[in-house]
Amino acid sequence: MSEQTRNSVTEAIWKFFSAFWSRIEIPNEYPVIGLIAALLYLMKKGYVSIQTNVQKDSTDIISLMDLSYMEITSKRHYVEWKSLGISNKAIVSDYPKDDSLADTISKYLSLLDRMSGEPAYIFEFVETILKYQEGDLYYLQVLDIALSKFSSNHSAGQFTQPVEFAELASALVESRGKDIYNPFSGLMSFATAMKEYASFTGVERDPFIADISIFRTHLAGIQDKASCIPGDVRDWSKISYDIIVSTPPIGVPISVKDENRPIRSECFCLKNFESLTNDNGVLFTFVVPSVLFDSRRAREIRHELTEKNYLDAVISLPANLMRPYTSISLVAVLLKKGRDKNAPIKMLDASEFNKGDKKKPILDVEAVVNCLNNPKHDNCVFVTQDDIRHGDYIWSVEKYLNPIRESFPEGYEVISLGDVVELIRGERHFEEKSGHLAQIADLAPEGEDCVRTVDFFETSRNLAHATKITEPVILLSSIRLLRPTFCEASPEKPLFLHPNLWACRITQGWVSPTYLCLEISRRFVQAAGNVIPRIRRRDLLGMRIAVPSVGLQRSFEEQNNLYKEAANNAKLAKAKEFGLQSLIESMKAEYINTVRTRKHDMMPYMRELGSVSRSIRGYIGKYGSPELQSKMANLFSQFDDAFNGLSALVDVFSQENKFGTPEVVNIDAFLRQLARKYDDRSSAFSVEYYCDDNALKAYGLPAHDIKKKNFSMLNGFISFEAEISKSIEPVKLFVEIAPLDLDRVVHNIIDNAVQHGFIDAEKIDYCIDITLTVDPERDMFQIDFSNNGIPLPSGMDKKSYGLLGEKAGVTGRTGQGGHIVKSIVEHYKGDYDIFMDGENTVVRILLPISKSNGQNV
């Protein structure tokens, strides 16, 4: 499809969506996609035409515009029609009532009654689609464009599978002449991507999605060999297939007959692979990383598949392929029966195989295939069954690839950490009621000085679950990252540890504590756990480290020198950064002082506004009718919110400090309340809030306990209820920021979207989607504000957005909004960005995860 055609089709689709959704209250509960799919099917079959002067009682009419409608909506067309003798125009369909999809078509065409007041948009859509017909797959491409636009709206609660997933399956699995089975089939993306198979059977639980899938097979011309069956994947077929392909939902428990406990959806296909395939069967599926090393149930499945020599390849994929719905990463698993006894198992780290960018990654399928065929590639390692056995049946790519990647300097001994340290438990019973308490957030970040005194740790009166340490130890986090930190505790200066910390006693006197911290921070150890990723003791103590040979003279001193050199290099890098930061802070201070002076003059006007408001309230209360008083109450409430916010903002500029005093703020509760506030208002746009619970769990933070209603979304890829029900209580997700500063950031972002993006008065579906997730590499909460207004002006990037006085094109005002966002988030050690995600503008802010979260992991 040419770019011109795609642009025209996309515009017609958006107008069709807008007209349809303007007639209903909850867009995601109405299958507008089913209506579009039905129309496309009729157009492909040649059953649709646009006719003039049609009998209005004809049963073949889909939509009609007459002279009376034209007289109201378009005087020019009204005059033109009268001169040509046209009394009406109609979209007519004479599809056979015995067509295999006749009942489904009729069901969706009935929805056009909701658009009876907007026939022009129906005509524009049909005329545009009929105008361009480029190739055999044209109508399928149009439907897929509609699906992608529909799913890009969070309110729809849907997600479309990246096309690269099906391309990867096609590249790794030979499908010619094969019978393929696809549980959790969704939109049948695999069926339309894989080639020359004998038959393809998909099973989809959601009847609406099954309808769309059936339309897709007809538009692709594969309906004779590919079928989608509405049903339950638990009703396994008795047929043995050649191939199984699947993108199961994430984190959905599935109850299985004859099983005491539900099985995780990601393990469902793995468990049933043997019984559902023939002697040379193949399975290609996606799982979350925790399936590779987590839980007794998953280990039993991994053990069985490994011992039967079915495991052929494990491929870790780039993170964020499923943005904006979740940032959690995926792993592709390939199983094969009939493998040679000594055939290698391919472990591939494709996490950097991205041909897009970090904001919108796209899997590089060609790079994956080339790497799998090259055993000498740095990102790929071939292992044996024995390797998997010795690795406790863990399938994690990092476990087998990282030891090869590890480098150890010459003249050093490579030993296990357990050779030089032992874990100590500490005292559980002690007399102290308060003391210095060490928590995960207190440990040394990577690249910083690893030495902490006991006094560094804050005093706490809550030692109920702590242990007492009275000797020098290396502290380690048992969750996600180790963050080694050395502290010289003693009986006179005891240290108390949070339960999520380990204490290591050095057992060899020739090992320097600071060097050991440096060496531990350089090494990798796999964390295991679906909800909280914990590091296991045996994995920790088995970690390989390098130490100067015991036989070398002055070994201890050499270790200290190595640590000091690394620490000095880190300090030098920070010093360079600090020099620039000092200049920036100076510029900020000068700007703030100027603004403070100007804001000082606002106070008299603020007092006058308050006085006028009180007078109006008094007048209406005395002379206004009850009906008027009721109507004005809501307006006064909105006035009070705005006035109080403005008063608080003026107070900020009259204070000596540029920013408020940081407080522990529940960011989940704050964002939920923000969305609810806009729900309660009569606004020209909506605000929706979504929380990426899968990413929160993977990081080890609390997540909402949401009962999954569906096994699959629009494409069967991920069962993810995007919008958290407003009745669900917030979970404990904390940042440290002054509440007023957080308010200023958020409202500047929203106000900018309204001012610069929501400027088409005829558009009625403007929306701001707020998504909360985690950036695990930076230990920050990531909050995306995505709006569907007009695109960013040319040249507007992160740097321009944060500049003082930089205006956003013709709609620009003072050019301070972006600078305020930048100043505040950077003051609190966060970050920001702005970019286009498809047709949506995204402003992203990142705020450090508060150490208070460490107490609630």
Image (cartoon, rainbow, N blue to C red):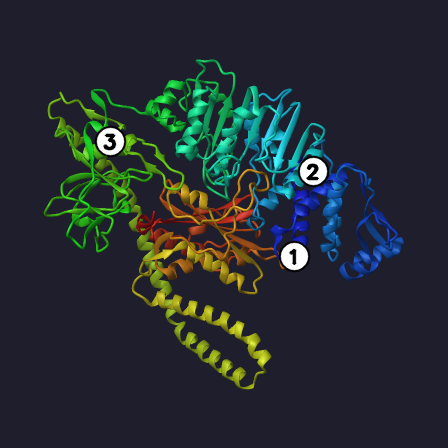
From what the image shows, is residue 676 above or below residue 324?
below
- State the residue at coordinates (41%, 43%): 697
Label located before the other in sequence (2 or 1): 1
**Which residue reaches farthest bottom?**
622
Badge 3 amino acid? Glu
Q: To which quarter of the image does residue 197 belong?
A: top right
Q: CA distance from mark 1 to mark 3?
A: 61 Å
Badge 2 amino acid? Phe
Q: Confirm whether residue 805 shows in the render.
A: no
Residue at the disc numbered 2: 215
Between marks 1 and 3 in the image, the one whose residue lies nearer the viewer: 1
User: 386 left or right of 482?
Assistant: right
From what the image shows, is residue 831 above or below residue 562?
below
Give the x, y percent position of residue 257.
53, 36
Say the numbered circle drawn on residue 656.
none
Label located before the other in sequence (2 or 3): 2
Label pair 2/3, CB-CB below 8 angstroms? no
Judge the density around disc 2: few (<14), some (14-19), many (≥20) Cα neighbours within 10 Å: many
Say the numbered circle drawn on residue 519.
3
Q: CA distance from mark 2 to mark 3?
A: 58 Å
Foreground residue among 248 and 175? 248
Q: Confirm whether residue 789 shows in the render.
A: yes
- State the residue at coordinates (45%, 43%): 694
- State the residue at coordinates (39%, 66%): 649
Foreground residue among 547 and 99? 99
Label located before the other in sequence (1 or 3): 1
Say the numbered circle drawn on residue 24.
1
Q: Secondary structure at mark 3?
A: helix
